[in-house]
Image (cartoon, rainbow, N blue to C red):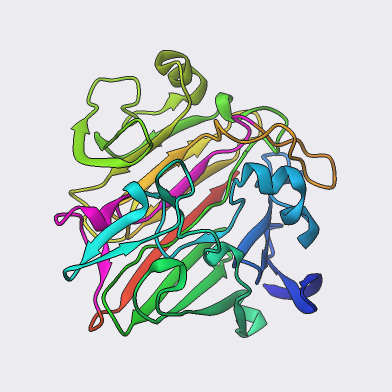
Amino acid sequence: MKILTRPFGSINEVAVDAYILENSNGLKVTITNYGATITSIQVPDKDGNVEEIVCGFDTLDGYFSEAYLANAPYFGGTVGRYCSQIKDAQFILDGQEYQLAKMVGENNLHGGLVGFDKRIWEVELYNPEEAAIAMRLVSQHLEEGFPGNVEVKVTFSLTEANAIQIAYHATTDQDTPFTITNHSYFNLSGFKETVENHAVRVASEKRQVWDESGAATGENQSIAGQPDDLREPKSIGDVHAAMNDGFEHFYLFEEKGFDLAEVAEIHEETSGRSLKISTTEPGMLFYTGKYTSDELQRESGLQYGKFRGFCCETHRYPNGPNFPDSPKSILRKDETYESTTIFQFEW
């Protein structure tokens, strides 16, 4: 187990670094303190060949290219102060109305114009033998329109059991909407193909209903027996064909509550790689990159684009601040936000 550090770039003369966590099995994850962003995960296949399996870039410049800024895919970033879309970019909390930036039509997305994924985080290095690193951020009162001063900590850990654990911790001095996630896009084939040849299982028979703007309506629906019922493994491509669309589904884990449990598994047959997702969160947005631009690629030439990466975004309910029965969508000033998600790899 070890951690290495290398320069990643700079913003307004402020240095940004990349931190490489590596275990003895050949699994390597690179994280930059710009946006607490996972930029690379390299994983062996069943024959021992180590390949890149997430969308990202090898230098900071990649996150500021014209194509990337136009498409805004949030590759690998820590997204906050509130994930997904908030309807009409507004909410009422404790009798006061708050207005946010309108980003997707009339709606707010992923915390605003300068969300957590676009901030430089303070780094706290752990013992390199533990292959763990923590990053801290202070989000000021009314930053991007959200109330309260929030102190956030994200800890990334890599284990010898080939698991990447992400632990989130936050406190606030005022009630505020709050939920954060990691926005990595995975392709277990090493980008040799789209993700449509992957098999996916998600332990849920219910998902949110979204309106035509992409915001949750507050209604949840059973999908038992439907093409997007993934309680038994299905080919992503087969479900795409049956739905005539890509995935952008927020699956609910109502019975699990906030306990840590395995909620999904994705497998790619040719490489032999599998990814299992465990989380304490009550839901997961499964997204197959249907809006990702084909103009995006890594410096090495690895091609990104439509259906070439899937996301497993574990967090509280989208548009939760506008629904009183949305579980723990508001972080209260006398509470502590604790959340864990684990990406477990096998090959």
Q: Position of residue 95 (x, y in %)?
A: 16, 69
Check if residue 150 falls in the magenta segment.
Answer: no
Answer left or right for 2 relative to 135. right
Check if residue 320 falls in the magenta segment.
Answer: yes
- Quadrant of the image occupied by residue 177: bottom left
Q: Residue at x 35, y 79 (%)?
A: 148
Q: Position of residue 91 (x, y in %)?
A: 27, 58
Comparing 296 with 182, the one in front is: 296
Q: Does the magenta stretch mainly form a helix, a strand or a loop? A: loop
Q: Position of residue 15 (x, y in %)?
A: 77, 78
Q: Position of residue 297 (x, y in %)?
A: 76, 41
In this rendering, the answer to whether 182 lies above or below 222 is: below
Inspect this view and state whether residue 245 appears.
yes
Q: Quadrant of the N terminus?
A: bottom right
Comparing 42 with 241, the one in front is: 241
Q: Residue at x 38, y 37 (%)?
A: 214
Inspect this view and state whether residue 59 appears.
no
Answer left or right for 175 relative to 277. left
Q: Residue at x 49, y 38 (%)?
A: 266
Q: Which residues are magenta?
A: 306-332
Comparing 255 with 222, the one in front is: 222
Answer left or right for 212 relative to 42. left
